[in-house]
Amino acid sequence: MSESMTSVATPSLWISFVALVLTALSIDLRMLHRRGARRVGVREALHWTLVWITVALVFAALLWIWLQRHHGMDFATARTQEFLTGYLLEKALAVDNIFVFLTLFTLFKVPEALQKKALVIGIIGAIVLRSVMIPIGAWLLARFEWILYGFGALLIFVGLRTLRHGPAEHDFHTNPVLGWLHWR
């Protein structure tokens, strides 16, 4: 295992991190529930975005301090940069998710009253899936580097097919999964 894949986390660090994430999620869900059906304005959304970015930056600073004390400045800087890179990637994926949700809400004509519930379920589902898929993907990549070539080839294939034929047309009325969901 390479140095960058070696975990320096102690059980107390993992417990603290999980507690921080669960606390942040709890606060966010509680605030969402308290707002009720009213729309969140741009100003309020920007405020909460800045709050959570600040929390992440404070966490990064505390991580750097802890790592610097136990492993030295170079190691602390490298690991903190990795955390911040991962955080920025997650922010980018979150923006992407917004467009996915907007597309799905429009496509399936989800009533505005149900959009908040669907959004919460989708966010929790994304958190659970990422919590499972990221460690599995990291494990696979650490052991089978050639998988990157397979994923790259798949992306190129899908991109070329989309360029040649345009986006795939889907008949949502005959999709068995959507039929099952609609029946429920």
Image: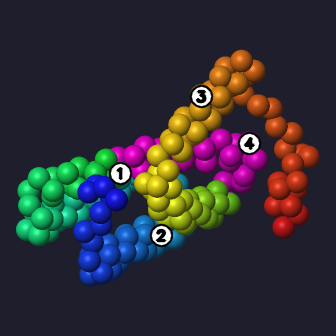
Residue 86: mark = 1
- Mark 1 residue crowding within 10 angstroms, few (<14) / some (14–19) / many (20+): few
Residue wearing tag 4: 107
Circle 1: element type: helix
What's the amino acid at mark 4? Leu
Q: Is residue 50 visible?
A: no
Q: Residue furthest top?
A: 164
Q: Residue at x 60, y 59 (%)?
A: 122
Q: Are marks 2 and 1 in contact (CB under 8 Å)?
A: no
Marks 2/4: CA distance?
26 Å
Mark 1 vs mark 3: give the one in front. Answer: 3
Q: Are marks 3 and 2 in contact (CB under 8 Å)?
A: no
Horizontally, is 4 left or right of 134 in the view? left
Horizontally, is 113 left or right of 80 in the view? right
Residue 127 picture location, percent across and down: 51, 63
Mark 1 vs mark 4: give the one in front. Answer: 1
Q: From which residue to which does the magenta span run?
A: 88-113
Residue 29: mark = 2
